[in-house]
Image (spheres, helix red, strand yellow):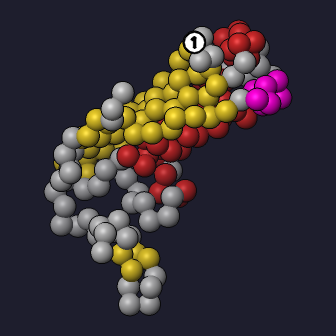
Amino acid sequence: MSELTHLDATGAANMVDVSDKATTQRVAVAEGRIVTRPETIALIRSGDAKKGDVLGAARLAGIMAAKRTHELIPLCHPLMITKARVDCVIDEALPGVRVTAEVKVGGQTGVEMEALTAVAVACLTIYDMIKAVDKDMRIEGVRLLEKAGGRSGHYRAEP
């Protein structure tokens, strides 16, 4: 049976037992993007969106989401996150916003889900804050870029 799925005799799912795993420094980096119209980027940059500072709110929402991932994703362990950073950068070439998140922990399980959740929620926050002016937005490319620490070692996604 996979380490990720444990079923008891009744077929019920159980959280993975990590008690025998070594406590190590673990880090994960994820990315995503929200593609908008060029005029929407101008609105975001100006800070004149009706709901306020779009990128600031998205950064804060992403960090908050990373800290609460265990409440959103079934069977995720609650973690004492030591670092959560979310960056939202306007990219005229998309046009849109590129979102990256880095999450660190000293623990017995990785933080990939926390980094991915941070990116997803930051993108959703941007969407929510500007949906009134751009119905054609789309969220794309949410993925793990890199992880380090733990038994499976270092992983880096292909560009």
Marker count (numbered): 1
User: How far across and how far down the image is residue 81, in percent?
Assistant: 37, 44
Q: Which amino acid is tagged 1?
A: Ala
- Please name the residue shown 50% across and 38% down the image: 142
Relative placement, left or right, of 44 versus 103 is right
Q: In the current view of this chain or complex, which residue is farthest to the front? A: 158
Dominant secondary structure, magenta? loop
- Please name the residue shown 46% across and 82% down the image: 12
| Mark 1 burial class by Cα count in 10 Å: few <14, some 14-19, many 20+ | few
- Please name the residue shown 51% across and 27% down the image: 99
Relative placement, left or right, of 68 versus 158 is right
Between residues 154 and 117, which one lies in front from this camera angle?
154
- Magenta span includes 132: yes
User: How far across and how far down the image is residue 125, in percent?
Assistant: 65, 35
- Please name the residue shown 57% across and 12% down the image: 93
Give the magenta range: 130-136
Quadrant location, the C terminus = top left
Label 1 secondary element: loop
Q: Which residue is mark 1?
A: 93
Looking at the image, is 93 positioned above or below residue 28? above
